Amino acid sequence: MSDLLITNVDVLTDKGTLTNHAIEIENGYITSILTSEEAKTVQAKETLDGKGQLAAPGLVNTHTHIAMGLFRNYADDLELMDWLETAIWPTEAKLNDDLIKWGTQLGIAEMLRSGTTTFSDMYFFMDTTADVVKETGIRAVLSRGLAGVSPTADQALVENADLFRTYNGFDNDRIKVLLGPHAPYTCPDAYMEKVIALSHELNCGIHMHLSETKGEVENVIKATGKTPIAHMHDLGLFWNTTLAAHCVHVTEEDMAIMAENHVAVAHNPQSNLKLASGIAPVPEMIAKGITVGLGTDGSASNNNADMLEEVRLAATLHKARLYNPKAIPAQAAWDMGTVEGAKALGYKDLGKIAVGERADIVLYDVSGMHWMPRYNDIAALVYSANSSDANTVIVAGKVLMKNKELLTIDEEKLRSEICKAQAYFSN
Ligand SMILES: N[C@@H](CCSC[C@H]1O[C@@H](n2cnc3c(=O)[nH]cnc32)[C@H](O)[C@@H]1O)C(=O)O
Ligand SMILES: [Zn+2]
């Protein structure tokens, strides 16, 4: 008997949309895709009626600081270093476990409601974040932010290693753990050497902000004679898997290093626009064989965790930059938001609806006027859908949102806790 059967649903597959089909799920995986006729004989513990809905893979947010939703619209219209130094870091100093718990829950509620089923996080108090991930059922790749310039730098390494030992591989890889060296400007070489040594000891991957702003690149070149990518490569950072957030200012040589060392990129178009960082050369990176996923970055620089916005921006931004409507076609943008993002996070069986894939599925309500006519569902998702069309969300075969009701989060309680947090940060 299967665990879950979704019936009467349109299914987005690599070969186009299969109308009025059924998806069978067992042990967190998609075990078959059937016609409605074939599905009649299937026995399942739970059945979901997918009538009027389109089943698509869940979105994969490859770069967030999810609890930063606490600082949504708190400090805007500043460039990165100014924003971090004058607004964000002093406020983050007031964070505690309890606030992180509610900030994380806020982000997860927002992501599930907008069709995201996996996120990759870099932040503080990651044990608490891991707890919330465990309870809410979302999929996550967690890294403890590591800053060598912080007074707690060495303690943070211990915390990241403990996080890895406790959670890496939890629940059949529903949680994975990376080391999170923050950025070249907060991680001096001596500290990076400790991070790299730890990555060898644990056989652990890396998640780091790299080449985000012109200023960062200029400073690293001044100090070392090399770009941040070349410098990190020479330090030995890329020996295992690396997820590099941003990569806005990369040279041809950087891209060659990244391709050769399988450095994957988390492209955060909205954050890069808002912090005036620039536009990453994404079509160029993809052409060189680099895996590029999409991320929202924190909701204090975005200012939401809506991945469909990133998919749309990825599809449109590079067209305008290159005066080329084919720069990132709709399918490529969709893939970056799903299967390519999953690859960037080290999942080989995530991000598609197909037999054998992990069952992270979103059912979109396609009854809205903006869904008519329906010539092409990929184009509809990329160019016309609203993320609030997400109606039902499944992660690892478990239903986490059903007909817009979150089943693992008490939103009333969450609202009241976020109001308290706002009052706390307003003082
Ligand atoms: N430095 C911290 C841990 C870092 S957590 C990750 C950090 O990244 C910061 N952050 C958020 N968005 C960005 C970005 O776009 N670039 C660089 N840092 C960011 C965020 O505010 C947070 O401080 C410590 O003292 O232990
Ligand atoms: Zn970031």
Image (cartoon, rainbow, N blue to C red):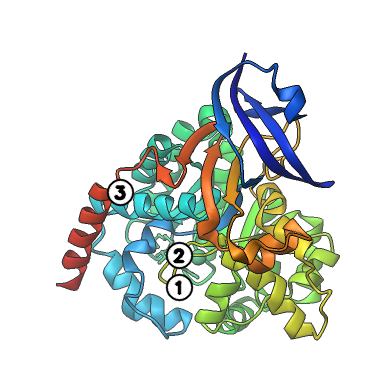
Q: Amino acid at mark 1?
A: Ser
Using the image, determine if residue 20 lies above or below residue 69.
Answer: above
Neighbourhood count class around disc 1 (C-alpha, 10 Å): few under 14, some 14–19, many 20 upward: many
| Residue farthest along the left direction in this orientation | 427
Using the image, determine if residue 307 lies above or below residue 24.
Answer: below
- Which of 205/175 is in front? 175
Side (left or right) of 155 relative to 181: left
Q: Secondary structure at mark 3?
A: helix
**Residue 299 pos. (x, y %):** 43, 66
Q: Are marks 1 and 3 in contact (CB under 8 Å)?
A: no
Q: Nearer the viewer, mark 1 or mark 3?
A: 3
Residue drawn where x is 57% and y is 55% of the image: 61
Whether the residue carrying mark 1 lies under 8 Å from ligand 1 is answered with: yes
Can you identify the residue that label 2 sits on? 298
Q: Nearer the viewer, mark 2 or mark 3?
A: 3
Q: Are marks 2 and 1 in contact (CB under 8 Å)?
A: yes
Can you identify the residue that label 3 sits on? 411
Can you identify the residue that label 1 sits on? 301
